[in-house]
Amino acid sequence: MTNHFCDFKNADVIMAIGSNNAENHPVTMAWVQEARAKGGKYIVVDPRFTRSAALADIYAPLRSGTDIAFFGGLYKYIMDNDLWQKEYVTNYTNASFLVNPDFAFDGATGLFSGWDDEKKYGTADTWKYQIEKEEPWDTAKTYAWTQAPNVPEFTLPVNKIAKKDPTLQDPNCVWQLMKKHYERYTPELVSSITGCPEDKLLEVYEVYASTGAPEKSGTILYAMGQTQHTYGSQNVRAMAVLQLLLGNVGIAGGGINALRGEANVQGSTDMAVLSHIIPGYMANPTAAKHPTLKAWLEAETLAAGYWANKPKFMISLLKEIYGPYATPENDFAYDMLPKLNAVNHTAIGVFESIAEGPIKGMMCWGMNPAVSQSNSTFVREMLGKLDWLVAVDLWETETMGFWKAPGADSASIKTEVYSLPAACHYEKQGTVSNSGRWIQWRYKAVDAPGDALDDFEIMHELFLKLKEKYEAEGGANPEQLTKLHWPYETDGRADITKVAQAVNGYTVEDGKLVKNFTLLKADGSTASGCWIYSGYYNNNDAPSDPTKQPAGSRLKDDPSGLGLYPGWAFSWPVNRRVVYNRASADVNGKPWNPDRMLVEWDGSKWIRNDVPDFGFQVVAPDGTITPTPPGKTAFIMNAEGTSRLFAVGTGMKDGPFPEHYEPFESPAKNLMNGGQTNPALTFGKAASVKPSDPTEFPIVCTTYRMTEHWQTGGMTRNIPWLAEAMPNMFVEMSEELAAEKGIANKDKVRVFNNRASIEMFAMVTPRFKPFTIDGKTVHQVGMPWHWGYASGNATGSVANDITPNVGDANTSIPEYKAFLVNVEKA
Amino acid sequence: MAENAILYDASKCSACKGCQVQCKQWNMMPSTLEKDGNEFTGTYQSMSDLNGDTRLLIEFREEDTPKGIEWAFSRRACFHCSEPACMDVCPVGAISKLDDGTIKLDSSVCVGCKYCTAACPFEIPKFRENFGVSNKCTLCDDRVAQGREPACVQTCPAAAIVYGPRDEMVAAGQARVEELKAEGYDKAELYGVTEMGGMHSLFIAKYGFEAHGLVRDPKKLEITSLMAILKPLTGIGVAAVFGGLGLSFLTSMGYEREGLPSKSKKGEAE
């Protein structure tokens, strides 16, 4: 989230699209209701009428997978009706930047310039700015740190300043390109693609676009409904672009707010439990691009903006991982970091790799892919090819007992499975980072039962044992374990507060915690496990006492009345509650809305309700403070200092503007352009996918979660109270489809496609309605995915047996949200 | 002592069932341990009605109207009537009225005759097979006595269930109904102000009483007053016999209460 949960109360309009927040994040409704009580509007856009829709002021239906058409139509509505926030767009976005004149989009093929059938957009070179001038780094002043002793040598970047046209008239400026690109997204066509009736579409457009007024705020709540598509990253960009057009980023009551699906999934991405990044959102080294530290620094250090400091964060991370072994002489042990090869290492890719042979063993730690992963019948087949599997969880999950799945031939499965019992969240301490980036210390309430251990204790024991074995017996690359810096224990026992200190960062010489990441250095004198967290655990007076650390702080004061609660926990970065908050005020530093002031220039200094997200003052070595007058740099993480309507330098693999494509499996022809699906989607040709054709499987299906259960149900189906709350697997379908298929409410039905056929109850409801797409009736059904066959009070079919294992072009997240099936009475 | 009441606002409820589960947890009410032992109701509703181990149930009713889907959520639990029929008929005095208006059922006194179920115009008290007693919401009188809110109130994430002095709750409920009407929910109304002499669990019905399964203008059954008269005259045992006759009389009449959730709607298969 750019903002945070309490901030929803500040919104004039809240749009939940791709999020069923009332069901999956019930607590959000407290603030949504507060906004509504003040006259705010709550819009819900969803394929079916959900519990969120039941509470909404406006509900609009939308066929699964057509969000970009919906947003593109909204851009056109905003531009045609002159409802965009002009001062904001002109100054805080790249609207005025001139783009390479060879950039083009071909509606006949659905391709942007630079496409290559082999390399996709890998060599596209037209998605770039025209350059006005080049500025080398000033190593005498701003970048003097690069010249300090022990800072690794690398070729310093050159800042390329783009040409601009502040009048926004140049035909190659981003604004004109954008107007041209979305000219095709008419309400008629958008309605025909999405199935949302035109009057409803325009009603939503009108209400949401009203937040383009400078003093108004609109917020977007989204979740997996946006991300789990073959163009999921573009869906998210589409929302960012919308919010920028309306001046809704960086303000109280605005932003792009991802409601994360698990209590600490924000923390897990911050800590890089992903294949493409290392902690703090830095690139995971690849063999091709980053063979040496020098190459990594040259490829990843931005020429301007705050990411120009990246070498400080990288060297500090290496110092934390390898400790005394990391020295300037050995490039801070950079060679020890594994380098990615060209293989896709995402969740889909891992199971493809098992099929291809190289993976022999697997650890599933708090993960249950036999139920959660797309095409889970294939996943279970692959688990059976492993030599060994270690599964760590609270109960026996479907993954631990994958050989017991219906239809599995257990006699032929040779995989050795080790089950390790883990402590649940009430049985261990540590931090959880919520969707709003608030890092909160959580305390242990009770001891774990039996042999169950806290995850960190399991990891600690495992590490010590592996280290002992590598030291005694050697093996392949033993130094990666034997040289690891692992001082996370006290009196011989695993100590998570030691990890917290390491993550926060410290000066190497004396071990003192650093105040925050502005003090990290690129010369090896500081260490930090995740630079963005720096400051969350920085009290040197009580390093082993979380209650005395910012993450343990529980002050309930809210001086601004905006729900910022600055003394409650710690919000990364540097306890900032609303990121990009420079954009909450005009170029002169006056807030767009004085009642929602985050920062304000009073003529001589900045008045602050939140921690400024820009250089607001300079502190001289003698402590003298000189306030920095307002500038236009509102997006300090981008080299150009602005946000981006047109994606330059983001590495987007499927286009600089979001463009509508149909899901990998779709009942409809792409009416927006001549390309049917996202040309850069991943795994589309994998044999395991078994595509389902619309002639045989004409019904759109989507998957989702319910309030009553959590993820694969491992916890909730084992708690009788919760199992009872929603005991049975079902498929929701319209009365019209049920009549066509001769299905009555509560009948047992089969939902099937080329991947599998699964049985469940039918829930026939007017809350699902057939869509009219391109003049034809298209049915959609939906299923929760909380059930499985493992022990528990409630069992049921695995929904993901029929979801496709195709991935988004950028992240390879599977397309769980839109695929094809057929339905029949069982 | 001032009278207290719960105010449930169906227009703020997201039907998350947090109250339903919290009620079970605080009051130590079990759910079945039998694998796959729960019915499929055909809706999001957990079970078709309250049962001996379930004092609070969130109900789901949906109607396709020209204005769109009306998905009416309801909190089904004891209303704590000022004129409680259940108390009138209880032959052993297990049901009593507390000073704050709470209708308490003392399971240590209850003999499990089920008259209260029969007499209640809403069929709310249910029989607990394993214990041989009736069971219903107590407004968490144990928590309230300690200065705490009822468990369901405490757990509601959207403040859709609040608790406080009854006159304040009535005023808040009436004000909310006016707000809803102004928003276009013209059938919105407040349940429990006068029903059964005034209830201590009020209900803001976003789509009107019927849409939420609330009995309009509920009445005590005639047999109830007869039994109430008999009780002091005849003593417990006799009352039990008469009551038993009364119960079978009621049953044979095939008495049906309109709008109760256990009834199927729109010809839906049971």
Image: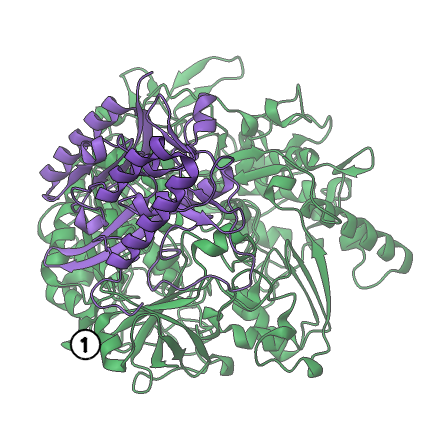
Chain colours: A green, B purple
> Seen from this angle, which residue lies furthest right?
A472
The image shows residue B267 at horizontal and vertical percentages of 22, 68
Q: Which residue is mark 1?
A: A777
> Seen from this angle, which residue lies furthest bottom?
A696
> Residue B165 occupies which quadrant of the picture?
top left
Q: Is residue B242 above or below residue A826?
A: above
The image shows residue A255 at horizontal and vertical percentages of 32, 42
Is residue A112 in view from this perspective? no
Q: Residue at x 18, y 32 (%)?
A: B194
Location of the N terminus of chain A (image quadrant): top left
* Observer-nearest of A561 and A250: A561
Callout 1, which amino acid? Thr
* Observer-nearest of A426 and B162: B162
How many callouts does the rendering have?
A: 1
The residue carrying pointer 1 sits among few (fewer than 14), some (14 to 19) or many (20 or more) residues within 10 Å by Cα, namely few
Location of the C terminus of chain A (image quadrant): bottom left
Is residue A689 in view from this perspective? yes
The image shows residue B174 at horizontal and vertical percentages of 16, 30
* Observer-nearest of B82 and A5: B82
Q: Residue at x 58, y 64 (%)?
A: A288
Would residue A697 be found to the left or right of residue A431 on screen? left
The image shows residue B86 at horizontal and vertical percentages of 33, 38
Q: Is residue A418 above or below residue A628?
A: below
Q: Is residue B114 above or below residue A7?
A: below
* Observer-nearest of B73 and A687: B73
Q: Is residue B233 above or below residue A687?
A: above
What is the secondary structure assignment of the residue under circle 1? Answer: strand
> Residue A447 occupies which quadrant of the picture?
top right
> Residue B171 occupies which quadrant of the picture?
top left
Tell me the chain of label 1. A
